[in-house]
Image (cartoon, rainbow, N blue to C red):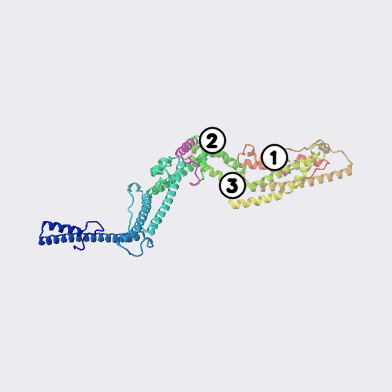
Amino acid sequence: MAVTDAQNPLLGETTCGSLLQKLQEIWDEVGESDEERDKMLLQIEQECLDVYKRKVKQAATSRAQLLQALSDAKLELSTLVSALGDKNFGGIPEKASGTIKEQLAAIAPALDQLWKQKEERVKEFSDVQSQIQKICGEIAGNVSEQTGTPAVDESDLSLKKLDEYQAKLQELQKEKSDRLHKVLEFVSTVHDLCAVLGMDFFSTVTEVHPSLDDSTGVQSKSISNETLLRLAKTVSALNEDKKQRLHKLQELATQLIDLWNLMDTPEEERKLFDHVTCNISASVDEVTVPGALALDLIEQAEVEVERLDQLKSSRMKEIAFKRQVELEEIFARAHIEIDPEAAREKIMSLIDSGNVEPAELLADMDNQIAKAKDEALSRKEILDRVEKWMSACEEESWLEDYNRDENRYNASRGAHLNLKRAEKARILVNKIPGMVDTLVAKTRAWEEDRGISFAYDGVPLLAMLDEYAMLRQEREEEKRRLRDQKKYHEQQNTEQEAIFGSRPSPARSASTKKVVGPRANGGANGTPSRRLSLNANQNGSRSGGKDGKRDSMRLVAPANYVAISKEDAASHVSGTDPVPASP
């Protein structure tokens, strides 16, 4: 040791050898024994050994710590790579070579990079999960109960897991969008329904949820299951209310129109309720005008119906008699005989007794009017033919008067017009037999179909036609008898003139003084015209009964059959002028 630890003069520093040499010098000077010196040296060696052991132990501990740190770093590296799911991470050293510190130095950058990546990934997970938690809370309706951010599972921070969360977030976002769209549709429907029904939209919609007010943003509106359910119930309730109100309003509108028609309400007064009657045939979906089904409008219509009902009761007799007049006019046009006085007395007794509702009475009269119109329609064809037949009879009567006029060929004013009329009248008169035959056939078919007799102003039409045919035959026979009698007298006169010579005839002088003119309103024998006798009711009066009507028929028919009275026939027989023959 003395050799090893000798002082190195080149270094010029204190070493163990120089100190030991110094100690030898001190011992020599002091005079320490060898035993003491050996003991002292042995103690020095033991103390040096202890220092070395301590240093070695410290070095070993440091190495163990470094190895543990390296092991922890590798484990952490492996854990981070596994958690991040990045198996192809390129920052990991390929081979574990070099000292421990070198290995630690090589792993440290990769760890730093992975830690930063983990922090970013955890933030992404936290953001996605927070949004998922928020949307789920909005759907469940418990957003206010959620506190703090959701915990992130750091054991699996892979992109695959992140994609799963993002896919779930997208699904929730789509569901939220759909729910929000549905909520807005419900709110819009509630708004439209409230407008039509005249209700307060704000109070109605905020009663479902306060966030549904228009003042809040779209994204702030509640989309929870409960909100959607309550909105659906609200819309259903409003639709049902709308349906009931529309039904009520349509009933009131129908009553108004019936009462108006019943009482002939002027158009100006009806226009005041156009907003009520305009929806009388509308469906529920077609009513969209704001306030169209408001309660005050329905109440207004109810008040008007009640007012008209009271007015109808006070005007019941007037309305009923108006219906009766309409019924009588239909029967009069159809030439159906009724007893109007008895009908009016019956109406008066029903109204005064109060045993029948006014609406029922009017409905019964409307039913009678409808039946009368049907009856008139079924008689129209026959009545038209009767009208033509009677017109033809009038022309026949005029033609006979025209033929008796000895001055008809004179060049007087209007003579050419009468001549044209006479030509047309002859054509029409020749058609009378065919008219009668057709009328008889039609009448019989009508009676067989209905099982009743066809009466014309209370007189059976077939009886009238039979009487007409009989009278026409008698007329033809009378005309033939007069012609034969005329020929006989002319022959007698000729024979007398041949025996006694010509002499003036008093009959001729009498006939020359007689002027036969046209009759304006009568038949050939001076009877009243068809308009006055057969259809007297059209001039404001009706005959007293069937006998009176039958007598009036008898007044008209002979007008077309017996053209010349007995006195006229005698004058024509005694005279020499020929009498024009009727066609």
Q: In the displayed structure, would residue 391 be above or below residue 81?
A: above
- The residues tagged by marks 3 and 2 sit, at their Cα atoms, a distance apart of 35 Å
Q: Nearer the viewer, mark 3 or mark 2?
A: 2
Q: Looking at the image, which is closer to me, 303 or 203? A: 203
Q: Where does the image place residue 297, in percent across and percent down from the top left?
A: 47, 38
Q: Is residue 8 above or below residue 205?
A: below
Closer to the N terminus: mark 1 or mark 2?
2
Whether residue 48 is visible, yes or no, is yes
Give left or right: position of 528 versus 242.
Answer: right
Residue 19, position in %: x, y?
18, 57
Magenta stretch: residue 289 in it? yes
Residue 560 in the image: state x and y as whole percent.
Answer: 72, 44
Instruction: Evaluate if marks 3 and 2 touch, with contact meaning CB atoms under 8 Å apart.
Output: no
Q: Which residues are magenta?
A: 284-308
**Is label 3 in a helix, a strand or a loop?**
helix
Q: Which mark is residue 269?
A: 2
Q: Residue at x 14, y 62 (%)?
A: 42
Disc 3: which residue: 375
The answer to which of 506 and 52 lies nearer the viewer is 52
Amino acid carrying label 3: it is: Glu
Which numbered disc flags the more N-terminal residue, 3 or 2? 2
Q: Amino acid under label 1?
A: Ser
Check residue 216 in the rendering and tell me which mark sits there, or answer none: none
Look at the image and say whether residue 159 sits in the magenta stretch.
no
> Quarter of the image holding residue 566?
top right
- Callout 2: helix, strand or loop? helix
Report whether residue 569 is seen. Answer: no
Question: In the image, what residue occupies the spot 81% across and 46% down?
Answer: 487
Residue wearing tag 1: 529
Nearer the observer: mark 1 or 2; the answer is 2
Lateral position of residue 580 relative to residue 473, left or right: right
